[in-house]
Image (spheres, grey):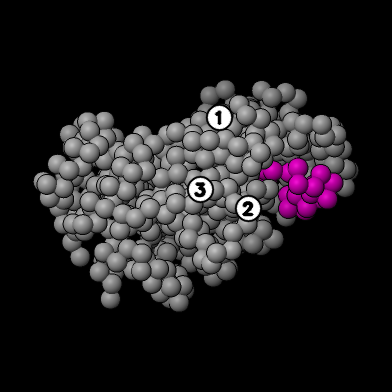
Amino acid sequence: MTYPMPSPALLARLSERLGPSGFATEPADLAPWLTDWRRRLTGSAAALVSPANAEEAAFVVAQAAAEGVAIVPQGGNSSMVAGATPAGIGEGRALLVSMRRMRAIRSVSPADNAVTAEAGVVLADLHAAVEAQGRRFPLSLASKGNATVGGLISTNAGGTQVLRFGPMRSLVLGLEAVLPDGSMLRGLAPLRKDNRGYDLKQLLIGGEGTLGLVTAATLKLVPAIGEKAVAWVGFRDPEQALALLRRLEDRLGEAIESFELVPAEGLALVLRHIPNTRAPLGQAWPWNVLIEAVAPAGDAPLGARLEAALADALDAGLIGDATLAASEAQADAFWKLRESMSEAEARDGMAAKHDISVTVADMPAFMARASAAVVERFPGARPIAFGHLGDGNVHFNVRAPAGGDDRAWFKATAADVSRFVHGLVTEAGGSLSAEHGIGRFKRADFLHLIDPARLAAMMAVKRALDPAGIMNPGALLPLAEAASGP
Ligand code: MLT
Ligand code: ZN
C-alpha cells in the first residue's frame, strides 16, 4: 500500500486556513521534528501542520481523509519508540500534525477536581497551572519538560506515581478528539460515572494516534501535597524490596506513591556521568529503592512514620540501610539519581532498551532469570534493570559488552537481544510494553508475539474507525494491512 502525495490543492487549502504559523513546508522548519527522541529514525513529510484549535484540527483531518493522505500526530516528540516519527510512509507523503500550538488550559475546576487542557500543553506547565489552584495532577515522568497531554494520552504514559494513581488511562475523565473521518468526538465533561455503552475515549488512550487525533482532555486532580517524605534504601535483593513495599503500605496506606528500583550498577553510572550527584548511603548496596510518601496538609507527620517503619525493617534484617531526605533539596537530589538513569546509561554507551512488565510478585525472580538467560545467549552483554518495581515494570536494558565497539554490537545484535527479551517476558505472561507503547521500534516484536485473537480484534477496531488507514501508519499496527485490510 502506498499513500498518495497530498495534492497541491490540498496543501494550498491547509496553508490558507492555518496561516504561516500553522503551516510549513520549508525543510529547515520540518527538520527538528522528523527524527525520533532517541535519534535512531528519521522520516519525511510533505508539510508540518500545526492547528491552533480543535476546529482547525478537524479541518486538517477531514482534508487529509478526502485524499487518503497519511497523518502522523506529534506532541513533544519524546516517544521512546518513535511513535511520532513520519517514517515508512513514503518520501514526503505524510502530513506531520504538531499539536504544540494547542496549549491552552481551558479550565481548572477545584470543585470537580478536574482540569481541561489542550493536547499541546506540556506536562510541567500542567503541573504548575493546577498547583496554582491548590491541586495536583498526579502523573510525572523524566521527560515532563517536553511530553504533552496529547502524547501522554495517546501512549497511556506511566511514570513514577502509577503505584498510587494508575497510568494516564485512569486519570482521563473526558476527551475531545478528531476521528479519522474528520468528525469530532466531544466529551470533556468531568463525569465520574457514565455508562452509555462503549467507553470510546479508552480506545484513543494508548491508541498511539492510530484511531484519532486527541485535541483536549479533562484530567483528574488530587489534593496538593501537604507533606512529602523521600527515602533511599539499600537492599541485598529485590525480593526484600517487595516485602518492604507491602510492609510500608500496611503502615502508611496509600501514602506510598513511588517505589523505584535503582541497581548498584545503575547508581554507579549516574555517579560517573551526571555532574553534582553523590551516593545517598555510605556503603554500596546491590539494589536501592527510592521511596516517596505523600500526604495532604494536616496529616500526622509522615517523615516520622516512614522513618519508624524503615527502622523496624532494618531491625528485622529486611533492608541493609536507609536514609531519609532531610530537606526538599536532598529529596530532589535522590530523585535526580533515579531520573538520570537513562541519560547516564546512554552516555556510557549503546544498550538495547526494553520496557517490560510481569506481575509485581514475579518481577524479582524474572529479573534474575532473564539476566542469566541473556548473558548465556549473548556472552558479555550486560543486563541492567531499573524503574517502577512497585508497578511490576522495569526497564530491562541490555548494554553492549564492556570495552568493545558498542555501536557495531548494537547494529549487529540489538534486534536479536530485544526479540529474545520480549520472548522471555511474553512466555512469563507479561507485556513487552508497560508504559512506552509500541510505536515503530517495537512493532515487529509486538506483531510476532501477540495473541492472534487479540490482534484480529485490534485490527477490526482499526478498520472500523480508520478504513483508509490514514492515522499514524506504521505505529503499533502493520503498515499495509492497516491501510488496505485483507
Ligand atoms: C524511566 O522510567 O526512567 C523511563 O521510562 C525509562 C527510559 O527513559 O528509558
Ligand atoms: Zn519508566
Query: Is any atom of residue 282 visible in this view?
Result: no
Residue 115 versus residue 321: which sits nearer the camera?
A: 115
Residues rendered magenta in the picture: 241-262
Q: Determine the CA span between mark 1 and mark 2.
A: 22 Å
Q: Determine the CA span between mark 3 and mark 2.
A: 12 Å
What residue does disc 3 label? Answer: 188
- Residue 195, quarter of the rendered image: bottom right
What residue does disc 1 label? Answer: 129
Instruction: Determine the residue positioned at 72% across, 23% down.
Output: 327
Magenta-colored segment: predominant secondary structure: helix
Type of the residue with mark 1: Ala
Instruction: Determine the residue positioned at 58% across, 68% down.
Output: 428
What residue does disc 2 label? Answer: 192
Q: Mark 3 near mark 2, Cβ–Cβ under 8 Å?
A: no
Q: Secondary structure at mark 3?
A: loop
Give the percent coordinates (x, y) of residue 385: 57, 49
Q: In this image, 25 relative to 423: left or right?
A: left
Single out the mark in the foreground, 1 or 2. Answer: 2
Query: Is any atom of residue 203 visible in this view?
Result: yes
Q: Secondary structure at mark 1?
A: helix
Q: In this image, 305 relative to 441: left or right?
A: right
